[in-house]
Image (cartoon, rainbow, N blue to C red):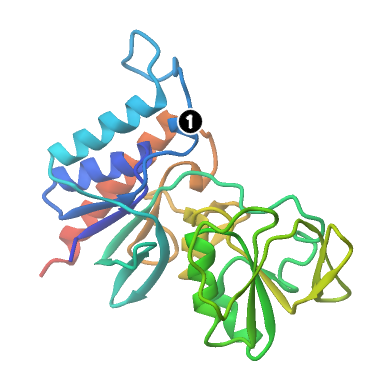
Amino acid sequence: MADVIVVGCGPAGISAALYTARAGLGTLIVGKPGGALAKTEKIENYYGFAEPVSGRTLIENGLAQAKRVGAGFVEDEAVGLSWDEVFSVSTASAAVYRAPYVVLATGAQCRTPPIKGVSEFEGRGVSYCAVCDAFFYRKKNVAVLGAGSYALHEAETLLPVVASVTILTDGAEPAAEFPPEMKIEKRKIRELFGGKALEGVRFEDGTALKADGVFIAIGVAGSVDLARKIGAETNGSSITVGADRQTNVPGLYAAGDCTGGLLQISKSVCDGAVAGTSIVKAFHRRKP
């Protein structure tokens, strides 16, 4: 078991890992290099580079630096977060990693798809967290909007509780192996419809699927998605943190773009440093 798990391998996560690993805490980074930063060709406003540097170079150099000071790295996608005496981070490969401290640092992601009715039915049939809301859909028919490992994880969480699960890929090809008891619907979605509560999904061809709930699980699980699973306070698309970057859940920290504010590398690095040093202090306070 590690002392600290950092979810995300961008500037915020690597910065946190550098501080915890250099302080002697067993640090494990879980993430897949990529995202918006990796696609940025030239960065000219980050301190210390006389010439423009690519985002991919920054990521690769950061990972190498973290490994050099002792941090471990697992290239995998985090899809779940839970707590039972310590935190457990589950991944797309079915691995589970445990630690008393976790830093969420997977950047900012827009989770709400541009489909009519999604925002309107949030809290009235549209959910972003299967482990949080599965209870409310016992013996009911639900759908999961997504096509990858994250959608599969949410669907598997729902399956033992609900009457049926339909995977809505919205025109995309499935990127995960969904079990046969889950129906896969690949047609494009026109809208979600209903009255006081969600009643179903209407496709572009005019036909409809009755559904009491739709769970949004597009792409990979972002920091906000993981925070919600464990009851951490969020504000829209951001995680609420204190000055030490700790959430309202003791031991759970968040850093970088997922906490809102200035979406810049310099701010992410600072957030990670604050989270890392805060964890080091908390770790030594709790030791007998």
Secondary structure type for disc 1:
loop
Disc 1: CA contacts within 10 A as few (<14), some (14-19) or many (>=20): few
Q: Is residue 144 left or right of residue 51?
A: right
Q: Is residue 202 left or right of residue 50?
A: right
Q: Is residue 140 left or right of residue 83?
A: right
Above or below 233: residue 113: above
The quadrant in which the C terminus is found is: bottom left
Name the residue nearer the viewer: 238 or 168.
Answer: 168
The structure residue drawn at horizontal position 51% and vertical position 67%, both measured from the top left corner, is: 152
Q: What residue is disc 1 on?
A: 264
The structure residue drawn at horizontal position 31% and vertical position 69%, both measured from the top left corner, is: 87
The structure residue drawn at horizontal position 28% and vertical position 77%, both measured from the top left corner, is: 85
Above or below 161: residue 79: above
Residue at the far front: name it. 180
Above or below 84: residue 222: above
The structure residue drawn at horizontal position 19% and vertical position 60%, both measured from the top left corner, is: 3
Residue 124 falls in which quadrant of the image? bottom right
Q: Is residue 219 left or right of residue 90?
A: right
Residue at the far top: name it. 50
The quadrant in which the N terminus is found is: bottom left
Q: Position of residue 218 (x, y in %)?
A: 59, 56
Q: Position of residue 150 (x, y in %)?
A: 50, 62
Instruction: Confirm whether residue 86 shows in the render.
Output: yes
Name the residue nearer the viewer: 93 or 275.
Answer: 93
Q: Amino acid at mark 1?
A: Gln
Q: Position of residue 258 (x, y in %)?
A: 50, 47
Residue 89 falls in which quadrant of the image? bottom left
Instruction: Confirm whether residue 270 shows in the render.
Output: no
Q: Position of residue 206 (x, y in %)?
A: 89, 63
